[in-house]
Image (cartoon, rainbow, N blue to C red):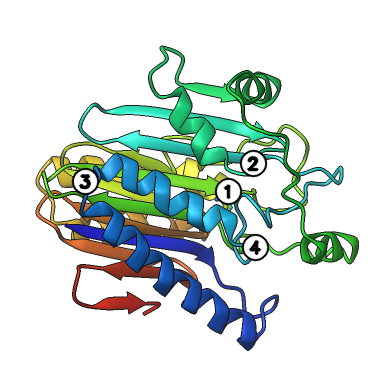
Amino acid sequence: MKLILHGGFFSESTTDAKTKAAKQEALTTIVKQAYDYLKSHTATQTVVYAVSLLEDNVLFNAGIGSQIQSDGQIRMSAALMDGTTQKLSGVINIQNVKNPILVAEKLMPYDDRVLGSEGANQFATANGFAEFSTETPERRAEFEKKLAATGTGTVGCVALDADGKLAVATSTGGKGFEMVGRISDSATVAGNYANAFCGVSCTGVGEDIVSNATATKIVTRVTDGMAIADAFAKTFTELKPYDGFAGAIGIDAKGNVFHQDSHPSMVFASFDGTDVVVFD
Ligand code: ASP
């Protein structure tokens, strides 16, 4: 069993040392909690659980503490992908729910795979998700000061369960100050992708991640026989011509755990039951 999660990018200019330490502590606690959960649950159930814990933590830009868009509203996106069934389910630009990843999970059995905006909101209400404001005073103050802090903390998790199955989940409050209607990478296959060979979750500037098809490319390369480290290296080299801003975490079916970022520094934690690795 293997587990890795990310808490998005840590930006020195917008986050102080105290917040950095708090994020490290939160990731350490959550990676252990999620690993315990993985002992008696599937990879798919576990990535949802881990991401919901990260969404509940105000330090991360997903769920509670999501960034505010240019019109002063919060719109969130999240997706889940089961590597065994190869089904992805997601919500894009959903509003006023505490845990977008739980709405994505609820959508998994349906034929329609990704719901956006109004439709996502209606689906959440119809399925009993209570109205919940995910705004925090900190994000409002940032918004008011117009401190556009790109990529400060999307969350994601990849898990390999005891049956050798892989799953991935990603959740975001977006990049902050974006235009209304802007689509994040997090609920697309560029930002969140898994099959039976590999699972990958991304963070960073969604536009760069979509242009690079980051998660899909890494997974496809591993599927075709490339070592996970080489698949990450090649895919990240392809971000260079346009200075793409991305970070990714991944696990392959053999249990190799990997992470890489194009700009320092992505906040991440992994756990194999023995050693917790936080940051790099
Ligand atoms: N990838 C997210 C987005 O572009 C932002 C992030 O990772 O922090 O919406």
In the rendered image, the residue lying farthest to the bottom is 17
Measure the alpha-carbon separation of dots 1 and 3. 22 Å
**Toward which corner of the image does residue 165 lie, by quadrant?**
top left
Look at mark 4 in the image and give the residue it sits on: 58
Look at mark 3 in the image and give the residue it sits on: 198
Residue occupying the point 67% across, 84% down: 16
Mark before the other along the chain sequence, 2 or 1: 2
Name the residue type under label 3: Cys
Frontmost of labels 1 and 3 is 1
Look at mark 2 in the image and give the residue it sits on: 76
Q: Residues within 10 Å of mark 4 (few under 14, many from 20)?
A: some
Mark before the other along the chain sequence, 4 or 3: 4
Frontmost of labels 4 and 3 is 4
Specify the label residue 105 is tagged with: none
Which quadrant is home to the C terminus? bottom left
Residue occupying the point 18% across, 49% down: 161
